[in-house]
Amino acid sequence: MNRYSYICKIHFLLGLVIGIMTAFLTMVFLQPRYQIIKSSASNTLDSFFELGTMAKISGRLSDFVKYDDTHRTSGQNATNIPIDDSHIHHDNDITAKDLERRIRVLCWVMTSPRNLHKKALHVKNTWGKRCNTLLFMSSVSNLTFPAIGLNVSEGREHLTEKTILAFKYVYEHYRDKADWFMKADDDTYVILENLRYFLKDYNTSDPVYFGKHFTNPAKQEYMSGGAGYVLSKEALTRYVMKGNDSTVCKQHGPNEDVTLGECMEKVGVKIGNSTDALGRSRFHCFIPEYHLKGNYPKWYYSFSVNDPQQGTESVSDYAITFHYISPEQMHVMDFFIYHLRPYGIYSGEQQLNGNR
C-alpha cells in the first residue's frame, strides 16, 4: 500500500467517525426541541380542525376566539369562572328587588340529557339565578342538577307533548308559588329585571301571554318558542285545564310554539303586545348582532307581525330576551349587562311601558 492510499483511507475513516458523532450529537441535543415542535404542531392541527368544525357549525368568527381561549386556560373551561365583584359594585337595585318580590316569575327551561351540562348549566349559572323559581325540563330526571324528567321522548317531533307535560307539571306543583310562567330554551338569554318591569302593569288574572309575535302562512298567530314566551296565571290555568283535551288542542307534533298558539286561541287566551312605548322590540329570536345589523333570514320578514327593523333604534333599551346564545355568550352577556360600567354615567329609569 503506497503512502497516498494510506492517507486516503485515514481521511475516509476520520470523516466517517466525525459524521457518526455529529449525527449522534444532533439527535441528543435537538430531539427535545423536535418533540416540542412536533407536539405543538400536532396540537395546533388538532385545534385547527376542532375550531374549523365549530366555526362551520356556528358560522361565526367568535367561535374561533372562544374555543382558542378555552385551550389557553390550561384545561379549565373559562366559562365556569364565576364573576363576583359585588364587593366593588354599589348599584342601587331597590326597584329591581321590589319588583322581584311583587312579580314572581317562574322560569322553566326546555333542555335534554345531552344538553344538561353543555347548555343548561350555563343558564343556571347566569340569568337563571334571577328567576324566582327555576326549573329544567328534560326527558330524564337528574336529582343532582336537578332536572325534571317528563314521560316523553326527545326530538323535535315530541316538542308539543313535552311542552304540554312541562306546563302541566308547573301547574300542579307551582301555580301558587309564582304569578307569571316563562318558557325558554337552553340557548335563550333572559333579562329578568326587564321582564318584571314589563309585566308590572298587567294583571296575572287576565288570560294573556307575551313573546315575539309571529304569524305563519296559514295566518295562525303565535309566539316564537326560541325567543321565549310568558303566560299569566290565568293563561296557564286555561292551557292546562282546557288544552289537555285532544278534541280542543293538539297533543303531539313538532313546532310547539305554533301548536301552543292554536291552543291558546281556542281556550280564550289573548296575544299581548310586547313592544315598548317607542315601538321597539323586547323579545328577540336571534342573537343581538342580527337585530343590530338586520341579518335576518328571508322567512323572518313574512313571519314577524311587526315589520322587522335594524339598528339600536329597533331594540328596546329594556329588551327582555335573545335567542341562539351559545354557552360562552351567556357569560359574555352577563358580564356586559351586570358588570361593565362606563365611569361617570348614571342611567336613570325610563318609562317605556304603555304600548298595549
Image (cartoon, grey):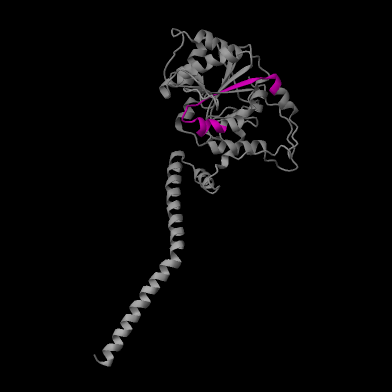
How many marks are shown on the rendered structure? 0
Which x, y percent locates residue 70? 53, 45
Closest to the observer, 265 or 280: 265
Closest to the observer, 166 or 208: 166
| Quarter placement of the N terminus | bottom left
Q: Is residue 14 above or below residue 126?
A: below
Which x, y percent locates residue 278? 64, 28
Residue 20 placement: quadrant: bottom left
Residue for point 43% across, 49% down: 46
Which x, y percent locates residue 325? 53, 34
Closest to the observer, 86 or 97: 86
Closest to the observer, 294 or 339: 339
| Quarter placement of the C terminus | top right
Range covered by the magenta-colored residues: 100-122
Report if residue 323 is visible in the image. Answer: no
Q: Is residue 24 above or below residue 197?
A: below
Q: Is residue 197 left or right of residue 238?
A: right
Q: Is residue 87 left or right of residue 292?
A: right
Residue for point 29% across, 86% down: 8
Report if residue 142 is visible in the image. Answer: yes
Looking at the image, the residue that sits furthest to the front is 1
Which x, y percent locates residue 290? 53, 36
Looking at the image, the residue that sits furthest to the bottom is 3
